[in-house]
Image: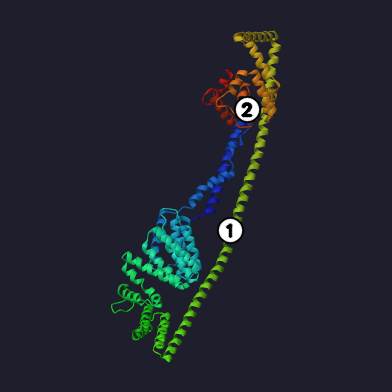
Amino acid sequence: MVCFPFLLTFASSTATLVIHLFYQTTAMKETFRTIHLHKRSTVNRKQFTVNRQLYTAPLLRLALIAALPLLVLSACVSPSERQRMETMLANYEQRNSQYDTLSIDSTRRLADFFSRHGDAHQRMRAYYLLGCAHETAGESPQALDLFYKSLEQADTTASDCDYKRLSRIHGQIMQIMMNQHAFDEALAENEIIHRCALQSEDTMMLLSNMGKKCNIYNLIGKKDDELALREHIISQYAKYGLMRQKAQSTGPILDLLIERKRFDEARKYIYEYEKNSGFFDSSGNLKLKNKSFYYLKGDFFLQTGQFDSAAYYFRKEIKEAGITNNLETGYLGLSHYYQCKNMPDSAAKYALLSRELNDSCYKELSTDYYQRMQASFNYSRAERKAMEKKREAWAYKNAIVLIAILVLLLSFAVARFIRHQKQASQNEQMAANAEYSKLLLRFNQAQQDLALFQSDAQQFCLQKEKEMETLREKLSLLRGNYGMAEQWTLEQTMLNSPVITELHEQASKTSKPSRAQWVDLLSLAERELPLLYKKLASSEPPLTDQEMIAALLIRLQFTQGELASLLGVSKQRVNNIKRNINKKIFQQEGAVTLNGNIFSI
């Protein structure tokens, strides 16, 4: 599946703008319809105020919400494509295990796919294969980077960690370090492989890695350590009944034994190597191109005084030489042979041939090392160019993103400005309509009152006197019941006190009272409402200061809006405070019954 995240983001933003414009137009139509209906009746001016958040939503939030699903879809891949790439990954692993050459380009496509759509284990496998492809092509620096990148994907703390694959990756790194003559680093990688083999309980891997450690010891001249470790490897193969592997591991130890004059052990290992290693055909000839065994066997015979046998194997080394190094050792062996036979001319001849081949080998090694260094230099230069290109791409990308953000913010600011202008015009029109309706109602009422007064002033006076008499009777009845006359007088005095009046004024201005005013309120409540104050103060669990003040304000007939202004909270928060008071004081859920409960005290 091809991904186009920038195009999808642009499409989603355009769709959001269209939806927002449609929503805005619908909201404006609804607003004008409301204004037209309210022209016919008298309502409070606040009812004409249009809630901006009801009709419009933030453009940026809508754009991001609309873009998110499309961006998620753009990162998806079809199941058939995933299955095809997983099959290709398994096929490449099989080819790599058979030492088949892998194409760098196709392996890179595989690594790029799993870097975006694969899990950590798949990324580790893909990066390892790409590193092997570069290593086969002689590009060791690139291969080393990819091997380290592959190791970064592994989680060694997980129970299902693939330690066998980790050991192979570290083995590749160790081989590169040996080729670069970085033997300390190679030994460090060998130790890591050793731990991986122990974790995976793989005996063959463990013993094979010990053999590679012996090769490193040989290169750095630690012959005693090499001999001890090779003897340990041979004993371990014998312990586990791996007789062929034991015989194959006896070959590299021969020169160490011959050098230390341990001829009996050397003779035993020569016999076992020829019989059980599987490296010899039915005629007793080596199948391998590297036939240095003939030189070792000739050297053994030379050291034990069997000169004819020694000369035979030295000449066989020269005759069947597969590489230049075998010719050199064969000539060197014959030079030693003729020295022992006291034939200086022949000894000098073969010594000269050996030296010339040694110089040729040295040139080959120097050329190979120079090529590796040149590859490292070329890689570093290519890496610098790649980093420069990458920085340029990031700069262009950041510039595009910045321009897109600026355009989006500018669009958002223009939309807000236009909405603000429309809202101001609507508010002005609604205020004029409200003022007109209010004045018209008062004018009509004044006309009716004037007409009634002029038509029948006496009847109007009688009507008002009757109303006053009825109200007087009701007041007398209420004053007489339960002795409430004194309580009403006290209530009116308390509600008209200076501190209550000041709090009402501050609530209308949405300003918070001072601490001194709260103290005056508590003192007033303790003096005039002792029962309520005592019940609130002795609540268990105790009320907070905010809940205490809110309960007193409710008793003093402050509205919910005034409570929100004085306490500096939202109306929803006031409801939560009332609910907490009702539960703590009256053990009732909700806030609906709180006012009645407070006034009942």
As measured in the structure, the alpha-carbon distance from the residue carrying label 2 to the one carrying label 1 is: 55 Å
Secondary structure at numbered mark 2: helix
Q: Identify the mark nearer the N-term, 2 or 1.
A: 1
Q: Is residue 504 or residue 165 the one in the foreground?
A: 165
Q: Is residue 190 above or below residue 542?
A: below
Can you say which quadrant of the picture contains the C terminus? top right
User: Which residue is nearer to you in this view: 559 or 30?
Assistant: 559
The vertical placement of 406 against 323, above or below, is above
Disc 1 residue type (three-letter): Trp
Q: Residues within 10 Å of mark 2 (few under 14, many from 20)?
A: many
Mark 2 vs 1: CB contact within 8 A: no
Q: Quadrant of residue 552?
A: top right
Task: Tell whether 544 sits left or right of 504.
Answer: left
Image position of 458 with respect to 69: above or below: above
Dot 1 alpha-carbon crowd within 10 angstroms: few under 14, some 14 to 19, many 20 or more? few
Q: Nearer the viewer, residue 72 or 22?
A: 72
Give how far across and how far down residue 519 sits, in percent.
67, 25
- SS state under label 1: helix
Q: Residue furthest left?
A: 282
536 sits left or right of 263 in the view: right
Relative to 194, does residue 367 appear above or below in the rendering?
below
- Evaluate whether residue 84 shows in this view: no
- Would residue 130 appear left or right of 537 to someone viewing this image? left
Q: What amino acid does circle 2 point to?
A: Leu
Q: What label does residue 394 carry, if any?
A: 1
Q: Position of residue 425 (x, y in %)?
A: 67, 36
Q: How does the figure colour the protein chain or chains?
A: rainbow
Q: Which mark is residue 563?
A: 2
> Closest to the observer: 560 or 372?
372
Label ID, residue 217: none
